Each structure stands twice: as C-alpha cells, then as structure tokens.
Image (cartoon, helix red, strand yellow):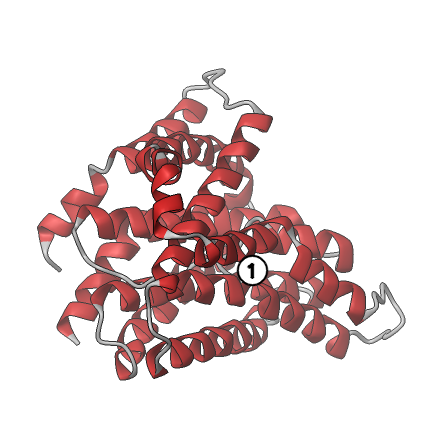
Amino acid sequence: MDLHLLIDNLTNPALLFFFLGVIAVQVKSDLTIPENSSKFISLYLLLSIGFKGGQELSHSTFSTEILWSLLFGIFLAIFIPVYSYFILRRKFSIDNAGAIAASYGSVSAVTFVTTISFLEMEQIAFSGHMVAVMALMEAPSIMVGLLLITIFKKDKKEDKIPMKTVVHHALTNGSVLLIIGSLIVGILTSEAQAEGIKPFTTDIFKGFLAVFLLDMGITSGRKLSDFIKKGWFAFLFAIIIPIINGCIVAIASGIFSSGEGNRLLFAILAASASYIAVPAAMKLAAPKANPSLYIPMALAITFPFNITLGMPLYLYIVQMS
C-alpha cells in the first residue's frame, strides 16, 4: 500500500475531528453536538452530494457502464445480506441475524460522502452516477433482510408486518428520499442555476463534514464500550466481512468500470453498513431485533475502519488490479 495515501487519509481534518469526538467520550468531556444541528448537517450532506451527483449525471451520456453499475449495485444489495445472514445465524437469533445482514447489505451515506472527500483530496475523478448507485442500494437490502426473517421464523404469524408497509417505509425513508430527490433536482437544474448555489452545495461541504464526523466520533465512543461486552464474534464480523466485501468488489468492479474513483466508491459501498436507514426500518418491521447490537457494529466498528484503513486499502487494490 502506498504509505502517503494512508498518511493523507489519517491527517484529513474531517477524520481527525472524528477521533477528537472519540477522545472526548473517553475523557468524559461534556462536548456534544445538539441533536437538531446534527440532523440538519446530515440532511445537508445528503442534499449536497445528491445535487452534485445529479449535476454530473446531467452532463453525462447514458452508457453501458452506467447501466451495469446500477445493476451491480442492486445485486450487491441483495447478495451481501443473503450470505451474511447464514454466517450470522451461527451465533445470533433470526431477528438479529436478519437486521445485521440488512445493515451490511445496505450502505452508509456518511462513509460514501467521506470517501468522496478522500477522492477529491487525492484528485481522483469519479462519476455522478455513483450517487444513484448508492441510493438504489438502500431499499433492496432492507427488504431482503426482512424477507429472510419472515422465511425462517418458526411462527410465521409472529410480528408479521405486511410487505407493502415494509417496501413503502424503505422507499420513503428520509435519507433515501432526500438523496434520490436531490439527485433528480440536480439533473433538472441548469449549470448557470447550479452555479448560484455553489457556495452552499460545495464551498462549505468539507466544514460541515468535519462537524458531522465529530458528532459521529462522540456517538461511536459512547456505543463502543457497551458493544465490546457482547463478545468477539460480532466484533470480528464487523471487521472481516467489510474487508472481504470491499476487496472483492474493488477487483470485480474493474470488469465494467475502468475509473479508479468509481471502483473505490463501489468497494466502499460494499464494505459499509447502514446505521440510519436500516435501524429506522427494523424498529418498525422487526422490533425483536436488538438495536444495541447492529447499530454499534455498523457505527462504532465498521464505520471507523472504513474511513481510516479501508479507503487506502481498497484504493491500493484498485490500482494494483
């Protein structure tokens, strides 16, 4: 691995603010980001990345690469939760295995946004259609996770939620709706009009990302200690499965995409885990699944790994393959 990539990533201000948040918890500081401010920043990040992706798409000609990218993203969102479920069932209940599998089949928008910041820092180009890929990967994994729970439950009537409700919730989840909506707005907006809001969508983006990662660091630090008490299997799964997914997809994506930036984004989408959209859906459809298990796995273990060591590792594999 090129050492300068790792050093550049670890000295990224946004990432350093993440570590500051973790340290603040460990020293028992009262540092907090107001909940309303945190929610606004997360909405801003989704809006900005969706809008900029739409702008990129509006200037792109539809190609076979875009089509294959979209299909590959949907395939990953279906395949990853299926094989993850059967690994997880060795140690966890049906509900917990389904919820964790859905989390790892879905994606982390914040990890995706942080990776884009990393690509910009390294001056590596990527395509706007990758935002559409990210948006399409949210809903299928949620539905697959819930389908697995339904299929393998002994009492089929227990906690039964109509699939229509599940599908509606997955598609209208706030983060999914905002990223897709912003993508469409970006496509419809002319270049001159987009320039008018560039100070909002682009210039302040990295600053907001730094504040948001500070908040993520505080949240991760709080959840880490409780999670460690749950044993090594969950910890190892939250590290090893993302590495396997990210490395394989970093290579496999080269079949239809030659761009380093796009392939890295594919790898990080496959390696990341949802801690926003999936918990919201599982709270409704699988209330017996334990959120103190699958949220810390995604947020306190997988997320920090991907934004520190994962991105340089997957980029190295992309460059070597």
Residue 26 is situated, as x and y percent measured from the top left of the image, at: 42, 25
Q: Residue at x 49, y 79 (%)?
A: 75
Q: Residue at x 30, y 38 (%)?
A: 15
The residue tagged 1 is 103
- Residue 271 visible in image: no
Dot 1: few (<14), some (14–19), or many (≥20) neighbours within 10 Å?
many
* 108 in relation to 163, above or below: above
Going by the image, does 314 lie left or right of 293? left
Q: Say which quarter of the image contains residue 133.
A: bottom left
Taking depth in this image into account, of 92 and 96 the one nearest to the observer is: 96
Residue 255 is situated, as x and y percent measured from the top left of the image, at: 28, 84
Going by the image, does 240 lie left or right of 273? left
Quadrant of the snapshot with the C terminus:
bottom left
Disc tally is 1
Residue 274 is situated, as x and y percent measured from the top left of the image, at: 53, 55
Residue 35 is situated, as x and y percent measured from the top left of the image, at: 58, 27
Taking depth in this image into account, of 188 and 212 the one nearest to the observer is: 188
Residue type for callout 1:
Ser
Q: Residue at x 75, y 79 (%)?
A: 151
Instruction: Determine the secondary structure under disc 1.
Output: helix
Q: Say which quarter of the image contains residue 64.
A: bottom left
- Residue 277 visible in image: yes
Q: Residue at x 60, y 54 (%)?
A: 177
Going by the image, does 127 lie left or right of 80? left
Q: Residue furthest top?
A: 30
Q: Residue furthest right?
A: 157
Quadrant of the snapshot with the N terminus:
bottom left
